[in-house]
Structure formats: structure tokens, C-alpha cells
Image (cartoon, rainbow, N blue to C red):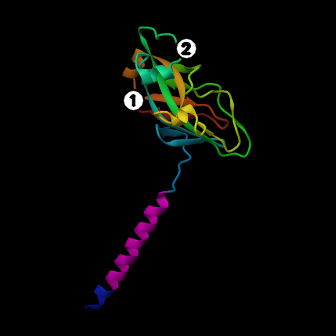
Amino acid sequence: MPRHRRLILPLLAALALCAAALAVSACGYSSHSKEVVEGEPVELGEVQYKAIFSRFLNPSDTEDSAYLVDQPPPPPDASYFGVFFQIENEADSPQPLPDSMTISDADGEVYESIPSESLYALHLGADLGAEDQLPALDSTPQQGPIEGSLILFLLSDSASQNPPLILEIPGPDGPAEVTLDL
């Protein structure tokens, strides 16, 4: 075998090993960006938020009626919209959750979160215990079909025609923005 071929094979093997190591090391990569898309985590202070799922809710649907407990029927030109979260407090002390969240559409319309009495609701303004998570293990929202805690909004029908919808989560070091997937 010519000498240059004997050198190329070990060089190719070393290159393949480097590429594999780079690929494996990228698996643990986490972004510290405060602009993410639905499904990606975002850290605000020592609390990690993940908007895992969002969708319009239908009061006539059996599953959705559990999310809309005690809500009046929406006005004719509006619909309920749910954003489902998984949240983790990475601190060894309680951390406050924001008092509210907002969604804005491409036309600049802003929609404030609304209170909910649903068993699936995320109670904004509460403290999240040290090294705790929401939804809590074995709770109704954690065992539910989406496995997330609900934040409820009432959006005008025009919001669905003006994507993207951007969820803003207030935080101690500035807000985060989550582009919701319609």
C-alpha cells in the first residue's frame, strides 16, 4: 500500500471521531436567548419556562370545557386561547411567578391573560417553591392530556389572521418572548 494511503486512513478516522464528539457535545446545548419558539425553554432569573403547547379552545368540546370552567361564553368576535406550560424553579428558594402574561399579534393588538378556576390553570402571581415544578407531579394538569398548566386568554378573531402571536413572559431581568405555533 502506498505511504500516502496509510496516512489518509488514520487521518479520516480521526476526523470522523472529531465530528462525532462535536455532535455529541451539541446535545447538551442550551440557549440563553430570551426569544424562543413554542416548545423551547427560556430562563428568567432562576425559573425555566417552557410553553409546550398552545391552541384555540372550543367551549363545546368535552376536553376544552374542563379548561374553561366558570368562563362565560366568548363574545361573537372572540375565542378562548390556551397556552400550556411546564415551569421549573432551579433555585433553592421560592421564586415568584409573574402576575400576568400577554400575547400580541402582528398588528400590535395586546391581549392580557385572564383568571381561570380550572383545575388545569396556572395561578399567576403565586410563588413557586424551591426546586419545585409546575405542573406538580401527579396533579390534574400533569396527568392531563397535554401535561401542562394552562394560562388562558381571550383573543379577538382577527388575532388568528395576524400571525405571529408572541407571548411575553415578564421576568426579573427583562421579559422573554415566545413565538406561538398556530
Q: Is any atom of residue 57 visible in this view?
A: no
Determine the residue positioned at 45% across, 22% down: 64
Q: Main secondary structure of the magenta part?
A: helix
Q: Position of residue 70 (x, y in %)?
A: 55, 14
| Residue bounds of the magenta highlight | 7-27
Vertical position of residue 103 compared to residue 148: above or below:
above
- Relative height, residue 174 to residue 15 (above, below): above
Q: Amino acid at mark 2?
A: Asp
Q: CA distance from mark 2 to mark 1?
A: 25 Å
Q: Is residue 72 left or right of residue 61?
A: right
User: Disc 1 on helix, strand or loop?
Assistant: loop
Residue at numbered disc 2 = 70
The answer to whether residue 149 is above or below residue 4 is: above
Q: Residue at x 63, y 27 (%)?
A: 124
Residue 16 is one of the magenta-drawn residues: yes
* Farthest top residue in view: 76
Q: Which sits in the foreground, 169 or 126? A: 126
Q: Badge 1: few (under 14), some or many (20 or more) residues near its Cα, within 10 Å? A: few
Mark identifier at residue 172: none
Apparent side of residue 161 relative to residue 92 in the rendered image (left or right):
left
Residue 110 x/y as whole percent: 52, 20
Q: Nearer the viewer, residue 137 or 2?
A: 137
Residue 102 falls in which quadrant of the image? top right
Quadrant of the image containing the N terminus? bottom left
Question: Would you name the residue on which mark 1 appears?
Answer: 182
